[in-house]
Amino acid sequence: MKILTRLYRYGRPYRTSFLFTFILVLVLAGLVVVRPAQMRIILDEKMPSADYNGVVWISICFAAVLFIEAVIQYFQTRMANRIAQSITMDLRGKLYRHVLKFKLSYYDRTPVGQFVTRHVSDIDGIAEVFSVGLLDIFRDLLKIIVLVFAMFMLDWKMSLVVLLPIPVLLYATRIFQRAVKNSFNDVRNEVARISVFIQEHVTGMHIVQIFNKQKEEQKKFQEINRKHRDAHIRGIWAYSIFFPLVELLSAASVALMIWWGLHESLQGVTTPGILLQFSTFIGLIYRPIRQMADNFNVLQMGMVNAERVFKVFDTNEQQIDKGIKNLTTLRGDIQFEHVWFAYKNDDWILKDISMHINPGETVALVGATGAGKSSIAGLLNRFYDYQKGAITVDGIPIQEYELNNLRHHIAMVQQDVFLFSNSILNNITLNNSAITEEAVVEAAKAVGAHDFIQKLPGGYQFNVRERGGTLSVGQRQLISFVRAYVQNPAVLVLDEATSSVDTESELLIQKATEKLTSGRTSIIIAHRLSTIRNANKIIVMEKGKIVETGTHQELLKKEGYYKRLYLLSITQDEEAA
């Protein structure tokens, strides 16, 4: 009931349509007894008196009732599904808006396939609560009440006899409902596992093939696939027992009706029309009971789906945004004061980091993998929040900036460039209508990407496909530089921007770097030390701490950690050459 109540809130904007659909359900439930009554009148009244005109008239009415039921059923089904799809559209949109605000740490530990399942199949399951579950259960329940009332009004003794198998059916329905609910839970869990597995392995298929692990991964998938099949079979087993039992109990009710009707007809109490009407009533009662059992399972499955979705809604992983500063320009004065940061508990990634970056200055961060360089960039953008210390931009703590405003002034170029399956133009502008194609072309010329873009089919309209798979690493990197350039940021962060490219592409990217960093505060996180010789300041990090600071020439004179790194990088470059 708590989940249903919560779902009802999403239905409030459509309550007028829901009320109209509810009225149609009431009318359908009321019409269920009309046609059996017409059949009894024909058999008991019109035919014995040879009133053939009456038979024709009632037959026309019979057809009219059928037509009215069909029309009402059409509108009820259409409106119910329209309401369901509207609610799930709202729910899916709200869920996506909700997860967009999550911290990156949540995405770091949550499989992509799980997100896909929540946004697609789980919300589709919620739709069935409104289109099939609630209304159909209520309709079938009303039909049963109306039919039982009509039966007792017609012949209460025969009604008691005919309904003797119903308690057995209700008990069996309850057992069936529990069995199918458990199997459906298992099915949903296995669907989520399959989604996660396929999403992960399609993305990492190159690793599977490089290490020739196709057979091993196929065995893993077969095991997950088998569990999914077994979960479905458990549900089918319950259906295979329940539905024949319903038919058996229905036949038992008909047999009891015939036995009692024969006894009553010999005494002149009952008539053939009453027997025909009761026979029709039996079919009409058992059908909705069977459907109700199925619809209860649909409802329960919808509740399971809703519970999963609401669990994401209840996840408190949003980046806290209480800032009110909304500045149109920034100077780019960045200060880290005794900053400590850990992704988890007290496993410190950054330890007592203090540094000052002047406006327009280019600062390079160097160090071994895991030294904490990229974490600094993540903290500056507030992708993560630090535990101790302070970070200010232009003398203002970054928490006081409105989050969107802060990130608007900071552009970041990463080592692993992500491109969407879209045109080059849209990948650069990110669908920002304020950025014109002319501005993109000018930026591409400045960065050095225009020539290769023009050679592609369609130029700036060329679709790069999923993750930019049709482009080389260097081309993707250049596009990311153009993407950053058109934003005209006050602060630029280059995170290992040349570590995965060839020498020719590196030269282009170095020229692009010079263009991008000119006149703005820049932080260059470098793997290749040859790329940061001209930085105003080089900060050397080791195990989360700053161990050296100075220019390239100053640090080479110190015989310290930076010089060892530099000499090692020269040796590696010579060996590679």
Image: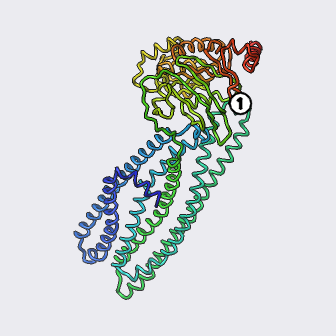
The one nearer the camera, 530 or 175, is 530
Name the residue at the bottom extreme.
267
The one nearer the camera, 325 or 67, is 325
Residue 470: give x, y in percent of width and height.
Answer: 57, 22
Screen quadrant of the C terminus: top right
- Can residue 476 be seen from the camera position used here? no
Residue 89: give x, y in percent of width and height.
Answer: 42, 44
Residue at label 1? 543
Q: Is residue 487 above or below residue 212?
A: above
The one nearer the camera, 372 or 92, is 372
25 horizontally vs 462: left or right: left
Rendered image quadrant of residue 526: top right
Q: How many marks?
A: 1
Residue 494: give x, y in percent of width and height.
Answer: 58, 22
Callout 1, which amino acid? Lys
Name the residue at the left extreme.
53
Q: Is residue 257 above or below residue 370?
A: below
Q: Mark 1 Cα within 10 Å, few/some/many (few <14, many 20+)? A: some
- Can residue 4 be seen from the camera position used here? yes
Residue 99: give x, y in percent of width and height.
Answer: 50, 41
Residue drawn at x 38%, y 52% is 11
The one nearer the camera, 205 or 448, is 448
Query: How has the structure been colored for display?
Result: rainbow
Q: Is residue 160 above or below residue 450?
A: below
563 horizontally vs 147: left or right: right
Rendered image quadrant of residue 276: bottom left
Q: Is residue 108 above or below residue 24?
A: above
Disc 1, SS? loop
Residue drawn at x 47%, y 77% is 255
Residue drawn at x 58%, y 11% is 511
499 horizontally vs 23: left or right: right
